[in-house]
Amino acid sequence: MHGFYIMQLFCEELLHMAESLVLNGNSSITKGTVIFEKGQPLQSTALILKGRVIVQGEGVRMTIGSGNFLGMCDVWKKEHSFTYVALDDLVLFGLPMENEKQAALLLEQKPQYRGLLVTSLNFFYHDVFRVFGKLKTETEKVAEFVHQTYSRYQKLAEGAGLTAEKIAAMERLLNQRMENYSLSEKITYFIQCSKIPIEAQKNYYGASAYVAQKQFEEQCAVLPQLVAGCRYYSDWLTRYFRIMIMDEKNLFSLVGRMALGVRRSGQNDSELSVMLDHILEQINNTETLLLEYAGVNLHLDRQRMEETYFALLSDDTGSLDAFDQEDLKVLDHSVQQILDYAEVSDETAEKFASAVEAFLACVDKFARTPEATALRKELVKYFFEIYERACKKSFQDANPPLAVKLFLRYGYVSEELLTEEELRTLLTLPDSREEETTCRVYTMSEWLREIYEGRKNPSKDEFDTDYEETIRKQVHEKKLTKTEGDDAFHDAAKRLHFEVENLLSYADRILSGNISTFVPVMCSEGIYTKLESAVVTSAIINKIVNRVEKIDYSIFYRERMVAYEEVGLNRFTVTGRYTPEFIIFPVYGRKGLMWQDIEGRKKETHGRILLPSFMEQNLEAELLKMLAYFRWEKCRTEMGAQWNNYRYPSLTAEYTDYLQFFKKNNDLSPEKREKVKAQLTQCGNRHKDVFAKDYADWVLREATGAMKLNRVAREILFTYCPLAPQIAEGLLAQNAYRDAARRYMIEKGKREKEINQVLHRFEKAGMDLPEEVEQTRRFVLDLQGA
């Protein structure tokens, strides 16, 4: 029974994955569940019947309760603007909702929703406006405090005969003061509407579908402006917070360093000590404000800050020497170091350096304004050219500058774009690789070297076309001569360029999770977790993969047909193990990509899974999804054109049939059919995504005996993704699992009989077993039959 509990620890952190929302019915949602996630396509909405929900968007964090709708404000945008997390155990009523036409139909046909929806949005406006007002007021106070303190610090330095160090970010702000963010009159109107008695509002809007629809349309149109205002002030507040404590040169450290210098010179440092107290108080207040009202967690190294503060109070000058640490000096002028190393043209160097400087000065680096969008495009335009040239040069350089190493590994470009804490973290992160692993893991520069030196073939592009097909097409279209085409197959530089242009530059954007606001350079404003806890390494990847393989033991095995005429075998299926290879991209991201399940057309090869250097989301959950996709694509490749043809049974064929015809499936109760329908809606009718969700339940829950799947899905998964024997034996005492395993056990018995017959043939002929037959024997009789 030991195997029955083999994944207990693996499951604990992932059991709160979002549950399926029942549409047109009530759903019980567990506390801590993410109901909808920001950026997720709008497929459904929900009405809170009981409990409270945390609403978090760009610059907004607040709590709402029963009577509020989740997601209805985004029917025109068609994707969620907020992440909704259950603060309590909830009861929700789910509504299918993809666009404004469905919303209009709801208000037309369901009078009871008119007053409720419009009134709840009026109150939603009131709550967001409260956040806006708080952020505006506090940001103005913090701005005044920082400017006055910085000015006073400079004057005190001059009076003490010391040189006042400058804060680059602060110097830029001296000519870039925060402006007042003005709101539309419509917003004021909705705020005033919220002050009308609730019943009066409900009765008024409920009396006319037309009035309710017009009000609702205007509410949805103007809300993004109010949210943008919250983000505007939270961005400014974050900027001032970084200046106070998180930037490499910050107000807290400069005042502390000056206090140390004044004290060592025998002068009175009392005013500087008071100033330090005020800075510390402002840091604490601002950190709390950003977290509670804007949902911004900047992961301040509080221990280090407090140690420094108390060392100053106790006159511990030994500890205070930490102020004078300059070990990051080697990263000064990183942009120029990288450009010099890459040896790009003067024009490219000048334009990229200018773009980085403009990006540094940008208050909202991820704004959707034309100016910010154009700036990000400028960075993207030159980044990958510089990356390719620097990477190529590093192949002949065993020890490039540290700034270049960080550039190639993480997409780091400038020391001014990260805080001192983040810079120090980058220097102490573990190596991404280790020896003797289940799956081979490459950093991007390591992978590109494999391509350049011919040990690996370039990846397929976004249209599923590989390098050789691309060259042949160019020859066919007369863009290349046959001789040029033959040379291109082995041209290292062209192979490298193809991989950078078609894999790195494309997938980098997807992995980031921010397609419309993507920027390839690493910056603090785009980091939302602690780097040391988000870093992706070979050890972490293989630890997760090993755990999954201990449950789904056949996931990496592929079958192919062979013949051994010397023992009278004209047709025999052998099994080989081919684990996917992982490539870590130089980007901070939110998702992974299952790029290809094989290399080229040969099935006995390794697939390729792509991951960012830092994973904002839960890495275990994302890897589990990638492995589910790998399972699906592996089956599609093996089945070819028949992958969804039920007459040729396979994982993909049976799952496709199950999801297409679930409404007529007598093995599913009406309640189960509704859940399948809800799954399909949530997944945008993508069968692969439904399978991935079920696969996660199979590995995390069903493998421990916690039944989550319906009987049809359970049987398909047991047949094609069988549980390891030591786990299965602990479950087969239950009827549900015994029924699900019946077909698998029959096929398993046939396969064992077949392999024993083959072994007998070789033994009778006095011949040694070929390696592929021996590997098949171990899989069928030792592993499968363990």
Image (spheres, rainbow, N blue to C red):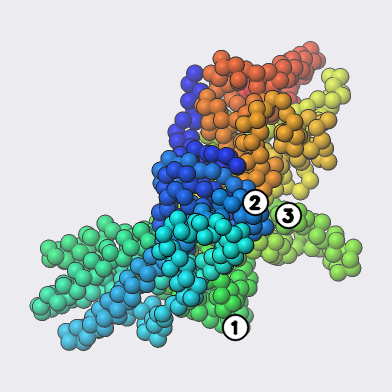
572 or 741, nearer to the observer = 741
Residue 319 vs 638, above or below: the answer is below
Residue 585 locus on image (x, y percent): 57, 57
Q: Quadrant of residue 193?
A: bottom left
Residue kind at label 2, given as amino acid type = Gln
Q: Who comes first in sequence, dot 2 or dot 3?
A: 2
**Badge 2 vs badge 3, beta-carbon distance below 8 Å:** no
Residue 639 locus on image (x, y percent): 79, 37
Residue 132 locus on image (x, y percent): 40, 68
Residue kind at label 3, given as amino acid type = Lys
Residue bearing the label numbered 2: 109
- Identified at 53% across, 69% down, the residue is 222
704 or 192, nearer to the observer = 192
Q: In the image, 137: left or right of 773?
A: left
Residue bearing the label numbered 1: 346
Label 2 or label 3, whichever lies nearer to me, is 2
